[in-house]
Image (tube, rainbow, N blue to C red):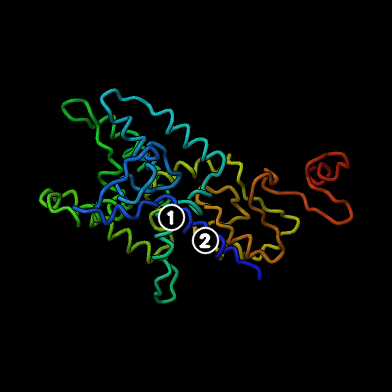
Amino acid sequence: MKISQKLKRKAIQIAAFGLNNCHVGNFFQKGGAKLYTGPWKQFCAPGLNCYSCPAAGLSCPIGALQSVTGSMKMDVSFYVVGFLLAVGVLLGRFVCGFLCPFGLIQELLAKIPLPKKKWRLPPFAKYIKYGVLVVFVLLMPVVVTNVVGMGDPAFCQYICPSGTLLGGIPLISTHPELQQTIGWLFSWKMFLLIAILIGSVLVYRFFCKTLCPLGAIYGILNKVSFYRLTVDEQKCIHCGKCAQVCGMDVNPVKHPQSMECIRCGECAAACPVGAIRIGFGVFRGKDAPAQTANTGCTGRCASCKTCARKNL
């Protein structure tokens, strides 16, 4: 029995969620939920997964980046920057589509049945996350500091829905002493979380499309990542089925390396002629030369000059 692309991806997403949050027993500690603070917490997860979640075994790269830049020394975390660049150049937004725990949560919310209407965001909405990246992740931890020169992790503190859902709510609900400290900030985070959850029911991956700074970083690196999507225009019949099934509102034929593409593979599975390929080592241009049975052309040489004549 052939396993569908959707089922394969969902299995990988669930496995990634479990590996990122493997300390489930921490939710049931005596005296309330506790954080895992073992040696693995010094390493970053590739996706958005809150450090403060009791089950989390790894750190969030956005939180780690802000913690270092917001310190009194205002250092740059070369480990975190290098980690993000390495993962982004290798995989791009494949991380969003397969490895991000909060991405899985959004996809499950999108399955809640609603009247058959496809909700679409205005075109400018996809650019908001780049503003969030610049303002809340890069600038505010450095510019907005307290009396001793320390900046707050602004994205984690004011926006991150994963932190509120997986970290804040479990900790506050099991620690009465923390409940005494609830103020306007937690109320704001709860309001924002509810809005994002409702948005994720109405719009596929609402947070990914509009607010996620990690998606913004990987999206920029989508253009140069080794894990790529390519379209063979000699095979493509321009039926539009790939664009119709794309939850991220991308037309793979026009924009194969779109910064919004999460490499989920739905377009390749929907293509009736197999013109779309996703993976490592595929042709790096937009149009891959057709592979024909009589020539065996792979598009990786120039000996017969067929490709050169086509492009004249």
Residue at the farthest top position: 73
The residue lying toward the viewer, choosing from 150 and 42, is 42
Q: Where is residue 123 in the image (x, y as percent from the top left)?
A: 44, 54
User: How many neighbours does mark 2 have within 10 angstroms: few (below 14), some (14-19), or many (20 or more)?
Assistant: few
Q: Quadrant of residue 117?
A: bottom left
**Taking 204 as reference, is 282 left or right?**
right
| Pick the front one: 178 or 290 | 178
Which residue does the numbered mark 2 point to in the structure image? 11
Tag 1 residue: 18
Residue type at mark 1? Gly
- The quarter of the image holding the C terminus is top right
Query: Residue 163, which numbered label?
Result: none
Residue 12 in the figure: left or right of residue 76:
right
Q: Give the farthest residue toward the bottom.
A: 115
**Rendering quarter of residue 275:** bottom right
- Mark 1: give few (<14), some (14-19) or many (20+) Cα within 10 Å: some
Can residue 188 be seen? no
Mark yes or no: residue 269 visible: yes
* Residue 248 location (% of width, % of height): 49, 58
Judge whether 131 appears above or below 291 on screen. Answer: above
- Residue 182, position in %: x, y? 14, 51
Outermost residue toward the front in this view: 30
Residue type at mark 2: give it.
Ala
> Which of the two residues, 142 or 312, is positioned nearer the viewer here?
142
Residue depicted at 34% across the width and 24% down the height: 75
Please provide percent x and percent y for residue 138.
35, 34
Q: Is residue 238 left or right of residue 140?
A: right
